[in-house]
Image (cartoon, rainbow, N blue to C red):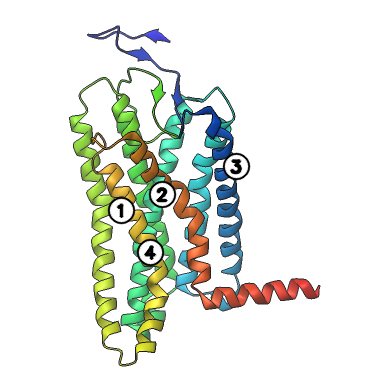
Amino acid sequence: MKPTEGPEPGNRTLLTAFVLSGLSNHPELQHLLFFTFCLMYTITIIGNLLIFMVTLHPTLHTPMYFFLRVLSFLDISIASAIVPKMLVNFLSEDRSISYTGCATQLYCVVFLGTTEWYLLTAMAYDRYVAICNPLRYSVLLNSRVCHSLVLLSFSGGIFVSVVQTAWVFTLPFCGPQINYFFCDIPPLIILSCTDTSLYEKQIITATVLVIFAPFCLILVSYACILSSILKISSTEGRYKTFSTCSSHLIVVTFYFASGTMNYLRPKSSSSEDTKKVLALIYTTIIPTLNPLIYSLRSKEMKGVLIKSIAELRKR
């Protein structure tokens, strides 16, 4: 690495690559971690592909399952942007990632994460319309509206990821060692050898716009949903109605809690291990659990899956 010109030439270097520390530096844990995350990644791919294919069934051509199909695609994508490199690092002494590769990984993670959060907001609107305005459901959430909501989610993800990646990689970095298992905003800011207070304020602003604002819309949707549920006279009816949105509520809670705690205070005093665990939740654990959460709580999906398996056995 060649030193660059600047007021403190001894502290800054022209980086061509970074080195990821990974989840743990204990050699005896590397194989265990490899098999654990290899299993989780396999479950993520198979589970989400299964949901993707099952929701293509003609009986499941509704907005809820259309959004779920897009969510499965995003889960596969965000896991694939992180886990394969992480698996290689578990078994290799060379944990380097190129400068371009790091920027690309950061872009993908921010893009996919932001898009997924916006999509979860659209899914909350879907549940609101289905429960609070069931007679107008097919009108308010027709095919054109659903595709527009997905397009807006992807557009928002592209805009946020371009801005965040461009800002972060204008920072001068004092060394290649990233104490993390993938290229993310908080560890890269910590690695910078310049005043990052402006960048931290920008990240807080982005967190409010990207996470808090949609979360407020989700809260409003669920407040209206709860109000409608309480008007249902029978306990069985209340339970049945609430069960249609409980899976979504579980995912939103995990996603919101882990995302805000990690990005709202990028240079907080919380330990690096805590930040790694939080990052694992929204990049690895949630994509693994989503197929289980949604499929186990959906009678329609289980019915189609059982029917499809029965048809395959007959062949």
Q: Which of marks 4 and 1 is nearer the N terminus?
A: 4
Amino acid type, callout 3: Phe
Q: Select label 2 or label 3 by which is in front.
A: 3
| 231 is higher (above) or lower (below) than 200 | below
Q: Which of marks 1 and 3 is nearer the N terminus?
A: 3
Amino acid type, callout 1: Ala
Q: Are marks 3 and 4 in contact (CB under 8 Å)?
A: no
Q: In the drawing, does residue 219 fall left or right of residue 16?
A: left
* Along the viewing direction, whichever of 308 and 118 lies nearer the viewer: 308
Q: Select label 3 or label 4 by which is in front.
A: 3
Q: Does residue 166 show up?
A: no
| 289 is higher (above) or lower (below) than 315 | above
Question: What residue is disc 1 on?
Answer: 257
* Along the viewing direction, whichever of 63 and 148 lies nearer the viewer: 63
Secondary structure under tag 3 reads helix
* Residue at image coords 29%, 77%: 225
Question: What residue is disc 4 on?
Answer: 250
Label 3 – label 4 distance at C-alpha: 27 Å
Name the outermost residue toward the bottom: 233
Amino acid type, callout 2: Ile
Label 2 – label 3 distance at C-alpha: 18 Å
Question: What residue is disc 2 on?
Answer: 281
Q: Does residue 311 show up?
A: yes
Callout 1 environment at 10 Å: few (<14), some (14 to 19), or many (20+)? Answer: few
Q: Where is residue 19 in the image (x, y as percent from the top left)?
A: 45, 23
* Residue 67: mark: none
* Residue at image coords 28%, 7%: 9
Label 2 – label 4 distance at C-alpha: 13 Å
Question: What residue is disc 3 on?
Answer: 35
Q: Which of marks 2 and 3 is nearer the N terminus?
A: 3
Name the outermost residue toward the front: 28
